[in-house]
Image: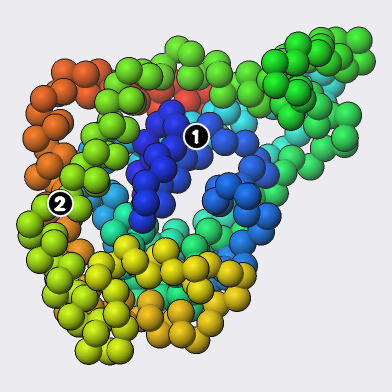
Amino acid sequence: MRRLAPACLALAAALLGCSSGSGPGEGGGPAGAAENPAASSGTAAEPQVNYVDRLPIARYSYTDTETAAIESAQQVLTQRCLRTFGISYEPSKPDTETSPPADRRYGLASASEAARLGYHANLGPLPPGPDLPKDALQVFYGNRGAAQGSSERITYKGKEVPSNGCFGQSVAQLSKEYDDPAGAEIARRISTQSYEDSLADPSVNEGFRKWSACMRSSGFRYPSPLDPLNNKAFQGEEISAKEKETAVADVRCKEETGLLDIWLKAESGIQQADIDKDGAALKKLRTAHREKVEAARRIVAKG
């Protein structure tokens, strides 16, 4: 799945990862979620279609491979910084065995996830934090977590620690030179607005009507595929049989009515029109992304 950078999008019915600026052990789940009751365990049973990747704005975000290169460079820079404090650190290896979850920009799209998880998010297990002693963790993270606006200085063995720690300093080092905040904001705006505008598209609304009729034939009454996502009965820790049945019918009706492809086509047209208006700024953003990835790969190559 592609990653818009430098910050994550918060879209209803859309799960967009953002890992190039997140640290080890930091969760990717909803705010306030202490743990994931629907963690993925094992490889997905079907190839997952990520609709986010197929939208025109995806050309202006990082691919998973590019994100991995940036994160690897951040870890190399963090290792170098920690070494100046006499701290040895080896980052944990990424899990390459588990298939990534299907995105949910248009709600549920995966039959296997629906049958297994209902509407619960397939976030997978949280990555482990750095395996370091407590005092060394302060060097890794700095004064993050201290009171807002705190200027407390942290020292380790008589040497001052960067305020945002070695990891935060490493993220900032790449971001300061290569990120294009103005271009990234345009890409975020297009991605957010196009989704909202697609909800008013006549073809999408007709697709909702057909999907709703299909759901009624299975005994479920929902005006649109966004409604079961907001069903409080499906938001607890337990995944009920009713939730799974609803989710399976949801995906089946999307397939029978062709709703996902209709929705993708409608939003793609909306996005492309907006992209054409901001072509120069977005071209600059793509150049910044390419240069950042190239710089990251050079850092990793040097080790």
Image side of residue 145 versus residue 58, left or right:
right
- How many marks the image carries: the answer is 2
Q: Quadrant of residue 289?
A: top left
- Report x, y in % for residue 216: 24, 85
Which badge, 2 or 1, comes first in the chain's sequence? 1
Compared with residue 254, is residue 125 higher up or lower down, i.e. above or below?
above
- Circle 1 packing at 10 Å, graded few (<14), some (14-19), many (20+), is many
Compared with residue 126, is residue 234 higher up or lower down, i.e. above or below?
below
Residue sitting at x 38%, y 19%: 181
Among all residues in the image, which is located at the extreme bottom? 218
Residue 248 visible: yes
- Label drawn at residue 58: none
Q: What element carries label 1?
A: loop
Q: What residue type is labelled 1?
A: Ser
- Report x, y in % for residue 171: 56, 24
- Label drawn at residue 200: 2
Q: Is mark 2 on a helix, strand or loop?
A: loop
Compared with residue 2, is residue 168 higher up or lower down, i.e. above or below?
above
- Circle 2 packing at 10 Å, graded few (<14), some (14-19), many (20+), is few
Residue sitting at x 60%, y 21%: 170
Compared with residue 180, is residue 196 higher up or lower down, i.e. above or below?
below
Q: What is the distance, in whole Å, between disc 2 and disc 1 at their CAs?
A: 33 Å
Residue 44 visible: no
Q: Nearer the viewer, residue 89 or 38?
A: 38
Q: Mark 1 and mark 2 in contact (Cβ < 8 Å)? A: no
Q: What residue type is labelled 2?
A: Ala
Image side of residue 189 versus residue 230, left or right:
left
Residue sitting at x 27%, y 26%: 186
Residue occupied by mark 1 = 20
Residue sitting at x 87%, y 36%: 133
